[in-house]
Image: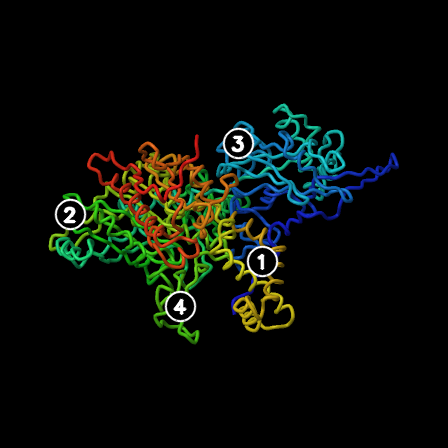
Amino acid sequence: MPRIKILASLIISSFALTACNSDTEVLDVEENKLYTSSRIQFDPSGGILSLPNDLLFSGTTDGTLQLPDETAAIEAASGAVITYDDNTYAIGALDGWSTIQPIVIGVDLYEDRTLDASSITQEGAVRIIPVMLGGAISLSSDANCKGAPSLSVCGVTGPELEYGNGKDFITAVNGTSIVIIPLKPFAENASYMYLTTDLIKDSAGESVNGSVTYQLIKKDFAESPIGDPSNAADAAAVGLQKLVNHYDADIITALGIDASTVTSTGVFTTQSETDVINILKTVMAAADAGAPAYTAYKPGVPAALTITVADANAAAAAVGFAPLSTTIELPYYLKTESKSSYWTALGDSPITILGAYAASPTTVGLAVTTNCPSANLAIPATLVGCNIGLDPFKHLTRFNPLVTPVVYNAKPSKTVEVQITIPQSARPADGYPVNISLHGLGTLKETTLATAKAFADQGIATIAIDMPLHGSRGVDYLLADGSPGTDGIYDISATDAQFGASYANGTALDFINIESGLTVRDNFRQAIADLLALRLQIAEFTDGAVIPQTLFDPSKVSMHGLSLGAITGSSFAAYANDATLVDHNPLDGTPETPANDLYGLKTVSLVAPTGGLASVFNDSATFGPMLMDELVKTVVTAQAIASGATDEEAATQAKGVVDFKDNATAAEYAAAQKYAEDEIVESLLFSIQTQVDPIDPINIAAKLAANTAKLHVIEIVGDGMNNKSDQVLPNGNGVTLTGTETLIKLLELGCLDPTSTASTAGAVRFSKGHHSSLIQASGAGATFAGVTDEDAVDARIEMQTQVVTFAEGASAAAMTGGNILISNTDVISPCPAS
């Protein structure tokens, strides 16, 4: 049986952010006086820290965070290699913290006092400063900085972040915690110092002081050392005191802040988010150009069609377009027959290699020279891909960003079905303009046929593939009795059962696997990589003529995506339209040639996208209940096992509680749901969002806005009456870093309505229609959203008209088209007055 994962001991509880071992009462022995105070929580020796916090890099050998639960799991494994498909410690696979998650600072409140919210929401109560941290894993290229003590500050890298609505961050109270809420994503691969001051007060009007531990280490080491530097047992405490003294004297005071008013300090480094896809995009291009070192990353030349373009034109006469199919070999980086696979690096972490080299230069140096002859130990980037057996985990990080292809049937790729539609119109001399069409979660590529005729009417071809684990990319490896074999029914599939018998086991949670945030991240990454590979090969698609004709004009490629397709499409477009390639060979002395049109997209339409994915899916009227059912199963299963049930008995009991939650087992379900909401959900969302940050549209928005001039977003806001707003992916409030509204703001898109001046970029908000109106006028989605039949049809026509006419900009001869055309004013929400 699969191992049962309990999700309750996640990161927040692991770090004991709730009050414990309170030091709100302190006895001064000399004065024989009891001092009472509410205090900021800080006791590293007791595992009490604010989050995020780079103290949790302590002991790293590969440049990743070191979590208490991760360390415990490694020790419990007794030498076996653990996997990181477990949310209780999966953050330990990352090279930094989230760029969009709040900072949480716990407070021990004296007796029955509460936090004074007004004191926390004043400017200066909390401050955030961009910094460069020192140490072996420093982001700096400066040798002096890398040689400085770990977590010391080498310098301030930018202006202090601004507090307030419409600025960089705001603050709030959550129970006994101070919460710092970013209003813009923190930069990736960046470090920050945050601090609290004595402006923060409790309900008695008294300042919230630093913890007793913090007040001790703030004292000047030269006058009041808290330990003996020559005693190894005191080394950690002495180091921490010197570090805080350094913060106070060299950074805080230098910024004009009175260090005596500071009640806590913390530093954190954000994770790398674009490094992995950036280098993958580069090596794919190098492989396509013939670089032998990267053969495994080269997508295969697509199989020629079995029909000529002329015959396809004739076949299109009946419905306006001809649906065709072929295949392509795409490099694959996930393991098959697994719902919990995640990407790993090609080689050992350079940090691991260099650490081992420092301890044993002769042995490690020989291993590197023997196994990685092109590597140079003086240039860490040349160690990427070097495998000498030192790093059992091979996490993808800023230090080690090159993913390893997984071999299937003696090849590092998988055969993927490709759906193509050809217009009835004759093929232009350079090939058809083509739109890459991306389907939604739980569906399959065939749903994009709903827009094919609209594209064909404008002379545009379409091309589509299934997302990982969707449609033809499900995994069939078991018979009905559980024995190995294939029976035509996918055992792993994210496509809903409504699409046919083959998908009887289908569930969107096979793609959005809440048990493994890394799997969710890398299902998305695989989809992005697939699309980049497909785009790279656009010019290679040919018909079945004796002298093959190229199907598509690679200079006239557009893209549109719906729902999951819009989420994935935002990252795909951001990378595709970034012409820069990273230097994958630092020793050759030459930068990479710009990608130009290898990947470029002329126009991009995102229909019902979103961001801040963990919260969005949890808050979704569609997916939220599905996620809660899974959590209830987890809770009931764990409780049953604790009561002596076998794994199989527990799983059966849990399934029964969920299956009959509306009647016979309502009480059991409600009890398990309350436990999940009280003990699991907040910690789970923190863990999963941190893991999926690299693929979240919120984090890619700035990159997409900077390199994609022709960008079109459709949002369903509803009419405020019967027609509801998007019930699948919530729009959010546009303030916190979650939802469609926030994404639109970060994309810097203006509002468009029928009164707007013609524009090549903007967001159109629909008052009528539902989440899937682009491809579906009626059905359950429309009923769920309260959409009338007439409005549903009108919304579908308007959405398709906008997407298709916008894509015409990619096919215009002078490339001057691409205005967003609004035709039906009855389904569009007016823009607010400026």
Q: Residue at x 46, y 54 (%)?
A: 520
- Circle 1 Cα neighbour tier, 10 Å, few/some/many (<14 / 14–19 / ≥20): many
Q: Residue at x 27, y 42 (%)?
A: 807
Helix, strand or loop for disc 2? loop
Q: Which residue is mark 2?
A: 427
Task: Confirm or deny contact between disc 3 and disc 1 (CB under 8 A).
Answer: no
Q: Earlier in the sequence, mark 3 or mark 2?
A: 3
Q: Amino acid at mark 2?
A: Arg
Q: Amino acid at mark 3?
A: Lys
Foreground pick, 602 / 596: 602
What separation in Å lies between label 3 and label 1 (alpha carbons)?
Answer: 35 Å
What separation in Å lies between label 3 and label 2 (alpha carbons)?
Answer: 51 Å
What separation in Å lies between label 4 and label 2 (alpha carbons)?
Answer: 40 Å
Q: Residue at x 72, y 30 (%)?
A: 220
Q: Which residue is mark 3?
A: 167
- Circle 3 Cα neighbour tier, 10 Å, few/some/many (<14 / 14–19 / ≥20): few
Quarter of the figure that contains the C terminus: top left
Q: Amino acid at mark 1?
A: Leu
Helix, strand or loop for disc 4? loop
Left of 279 or right of it: where is 230? Answer: right
Left of 368 or right of it: where is 195? Answer: right
Task: Confirm or deny contact between disc 2 and disc 1 (CB under 8 A).
Answer: no
Q: Residue at x 63, y 55 (%)?
A: 678
State the image coordinates of residue 714 (x, y, percent, origin top left): 38, 44
State the image coordinates of residue 598 (x, y, percent, origin top left): 28, 42
Left of 507 or right of it: where is 316? Answer: left
Q: Earlier in the sequence, mark 3 or mark 1?
A: 1
Q: Which label number is shown at residue 49? A: none
